[in-house]
Image: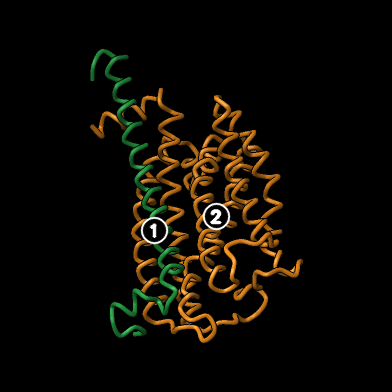
Amino acid sequence: MNAGFNWFKYSSPQTFFPLAEKLALAFGAAALIACVAGLYIGFFVAPTDAQQGDAYRIIFIHVPAAWMSMFLYVVMAFWAGLGLAFNTRLSGMMASALAPTGALFTFVALWTGSLWGKPTWGTWWVWDARLTSELILLFLYFGFMALQAAIDDPRRADKAGAVLALVGVVNVPIIYFSVKWWNTLHQGASVSFTKAPTMAATMLAGMGVMALGFWFYSISVTLLRARCIMLERERTADWAIQYAKGMA
Amino acid sequence: MNWGSLENFLAMGGYATYVWGSYLVTLGVLIAELVLLTQRRRRLLGQLRARAGTGRGGA
């Protein structure tokens, strides 16, 4: 039987390892191009906002980073769940590889939000539903990483982490809908699945292209980290040692 | 073009601290992540080579 693509071929670390490098380089290049284009649109094409002046330009990283922070958590929980259900080695490695980048984008969303809040709301921080649930997301990422680091056996660390990741996923819809469910200081979504966007086309374009850039960056850096995790966990395997010798 | 001059661009309509504070910190953490990953990879490969060298009677 030759028909069809063998998906399981790439579910073992040894075969995925070289593929991951090629993908990481391609997505890294795409991320660079998208971010340069997005920043050009954001700073040189999109006009100054009538109400917020140029402070609004923080949107071009704030919103894409906030999207990535939630999206990466869902992807992490997906891989963790897959690992828990099918006990595949690669799934746990992918979940572990996603967590630091997810935490990074959560931090960026909070940091840029704070720097945007000061000139527009007059405060760096409020215990608003959106801000608080995003902060909880950061703690979920930290909790996942700390839990995994505390358990020596990688397979058990994967299982424990997976349970935490799956329980924590309930926080993601809370973040997303918080601006609807509660009357909060944080504004509602400017871009949503159900309505036409409420912002200028060039602003929207800049935000979209930056989101694409962050997306490509996340894929690239996650694959690079997954490669490190594969080498760490397979350090006694012949292919890993041969690879290290070849890199000398 | 929005700015006319480099000074105007850097001033960001009076919001320089907030806008550049956001962009520079974001750029910083992304670069830091890449640097840390590169170091981790280099350290790992070194450990693997060291183990192969001592454990198997030389490479």
Residue at 28% from the left image edge and 82% from the top image edge: B5
Kindly identify which numbered label has been placed on residue B44. Answer: none
**Disc 2 chain ID:** A
Q: Considering only vertical position in the picture, is A158 above or below A114?
A: above
- Up-down relation of residue B49 to residue A100 (above or below): above
Asked which secondary structure carries label 2, the reply is: helix
Residue assigned mark 2: A106
Label 1 chain ID? B
From the top left corner, tell me how far across and down residue A213 is, in percent. 43, 63
Q: Quadrant of residue A87?
A: top right
Q: Is residue A121 above or below residue A21?
A: below
Which is more toward the observer, A52 or A222?
Answer: A52
In x, y percent, where is residue A240?
A: 36, 29
Q: Residue at x 60, y 38 (%)?
A: A83
**What color scheme is it?**
by chain
Callout 2 crowding tier (Cα within 10 Å): few <14, some 14–19, many ≥20: many
Determine the CA span between mark 1 and mark 2: 14 Å
Residue A24 placement (x, y as % from top left): 38, 51
Q: Amino acid at mark 1?
A: Leu
Shown in orange, the chain is A
* Mark 1 lies on residue: B27
Q: Is residue A130 above or below residue A51?
A: above
Q: What amino acid is at disc 2?
A: Thr
| Colour chosen for chain B | green
Q: Residue at x 42, y 79 (%)?
A: B13
